[in-house]
Amino acid sequence: MSNVSLTSAIPMLLKAVPRSRNFEAVLLFWVAGIHAFALAQIQLAVNQEMSIDLMGYWAPPTIAAWILHYVLRKHALNADGLLLPLGFLLNGLGIAMIYRLDLAEITNGSTQLFAERQVWLSCFAMLIAAAIVRLVPNPLVLRRFPFLAGAAAVVLLVLPAAPVIGRTINGATLWIGVGDLSFQPGEIAKILLAIFFAGYLVSRKGPLSEIGLRVLGMRIPSAKDLGPILLFWVASIGVLVLQRDLGTSILYFGLFLVMIYTATGRGFYVGIGMVMMVTGALVASRLFGYVAARFDSWLDPFSQENYSAVGGSYQLVQGLFGMAHGDVIGAGLGSGFPQLIPLAESDFIFAALGEELGMAGVFAILATYLLIVYRGLRISNTNTDEFSKLLAMGLSFVIGLQVFVVAGGVMGLMPLTGLTTPFLAAGGSSLLANWAIIALLLVLSDSSLRRKAA
Amino acid sequence: MSELALFLIRIGFVAVLWIFILSLLSVIRADLYGRRVISRIAKQNAPGLTAGSAANLGIEDVEGFDPSEIAVLTGRTAGTNILLEGKKEVLIGRAPSSDMVISDEFASSMHAKLVHVGSDWVLQDLNSTNGTHLDGKRLTTPETIRPGMTIRIGTTTFELRS
């Protein structure tokens, strides 16, 4: 060690990095063990015996995760080692919980089962992620078509409102579908939007942060530069009106604010954006009945009137009761009554997990999300080019904001919205989108190291 | 299944989840603070060397060597001299406030210092990144300068002359 100079130390550090792949392999073993534990515990608690069915829910996702790991070893040796195990942990916990709800449904004689679908959708999503890692050699490729990505996002957003293929489920127009297949295009749109914002803001960073009139000590950008922001605010309110979904519009607008703030470093945008968003939400709560009902349920969930109203606070209150039943260490997987919560397998899976794993378990899940977001921000921080920085920031923020909005809604901290819990909730579009985000973050983390070495 | 067994499984699952999360913290620890490095150099150099404390450290005394200047041999400032007369301490580093400024990318801002102890000059490395070399050896503990010894910091070498 006596003659280590700065120039010789850098290649030495880089050589040590592929450690992350081996670490990832160890973590994958561990996570697969946790999943087997969860499924076995559920079978023991519900059926009092273990059966070979367990393998059907355990093996396919595990194999898919290993395929993704193999692809990373082949094509992205230096990619972040934590993202895959963390996403896989949540995905498997989601499958276990949905399987547990299925068992309860079978006992009740219902035939509406979700677990098997979720297993195959998870595998599909992970394989798509592997394909992204394989096919996107360099994130800068994505920078070439910002407006194409933006236009595609807008088309995807408007698609559910189109006739014939558009679907309205539970009051929100978020789906398109052909026959039995349905898809939520908004989930993919958020990734395209992040790519669009990153590409647009990299080229407009200067004007947005420096040019403009000074008013009251703040520099207000010129209309030409501010235009797109106003346009986007109108668009996200438009989404709210068209699709009747508060959560989605909060998500898009929040993503936009964070990315513009990251690009320009100016609090002005966040301040004005928050004011616009809150005003928009308040106006919407007056104008649209469904938003008003959500606000009422949030402010006073336990009132008899809200509780018994159609689309009222019944679901929220059932979730709160469930989580209260869960206490600190939970009722134990398979030993609670999460099936009493409406939509426990999708919108309220967080409450279902809260009941069976307790506060300790919920905090572990939140810590897992925190680690995913943290890794994303770290990737953003270590990248050297502006586009990759912005994109990584936007993508990890999407996951973080979604968790906040969903968990906040389920816990009664904010009005309930129609966002999905990343990785946990039943639903293919959401799984696909979140695994695609993980894949892009993996690509971004890999290139950051490769570029440094060059 | 007995109640107790189910209870243990229930606790066990949450515990396994947390052990997983906590084990990941070891990675993050390295992110935040860097990898743990056990530095012998840092430990031994830690006490600030002053004229009073040098005697206690058992630093040897060299008779008959009373340098009056530092002569820079190589590096950007080669050929210049720095007078030592009347000085108790000479701070060497990249910082403009140093007594001897070394403009060298391998020098730390406070790299090393020379301390006048009795009639001798003692060289101490101030936990610099790339080290201070005395006659080709990296300095780990403060050492007395003998006649003809060369000191190297980055690409700059210098010696003490009477």
Image (tube, coloured by chain):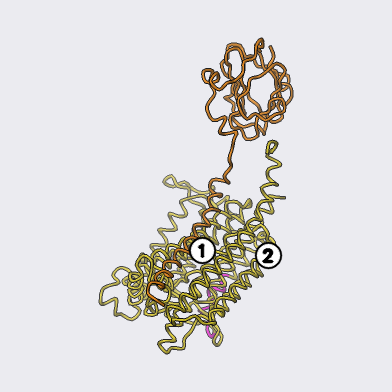
Chain colours: A yellow, B orange
Q: Which residues are magenta?
A: A153-164
Residue A246: give x, y in percent of width and height: 42, 70
- Residue lying farthest top? B64
Instruction: First in sequence, mark 2 or 1: give its number.
Output: 2
Residue pointed to by mark 2: A136
Q: Is residue A364 left or right of residue A441?
A: left
- Give the distance between the C-alpha atoms of the residues marked 2 and 1, in whole angstroms: 21 Å
Mark 2: secondary structure:
loop
Q: Give the residue type at disc 1.
A: Val
Residue A328: give x, y in percent of width and height: 36, 65
Residue A346: give x, y in percent of width and height: 46, 76
Q: Is residue A452 left or right of residue A27?
A: right
Mark 1: secondary structure:
helix
The subunit letter for the residue under badge 2 reads A
Is A324 colored magenta in this rendering?
no
Res. A192 visible in picture: no
Disc number placed over residue A398 in the picture, else none: 1
The subunit letter for the residue under badge 1 reads A
Q: Is residue B86 above or below residue B156?
A: above
Q: Is residue A55 left or right of residue A6?
A: left
Residue A103: give x, y in percent of width and height: 45, 83
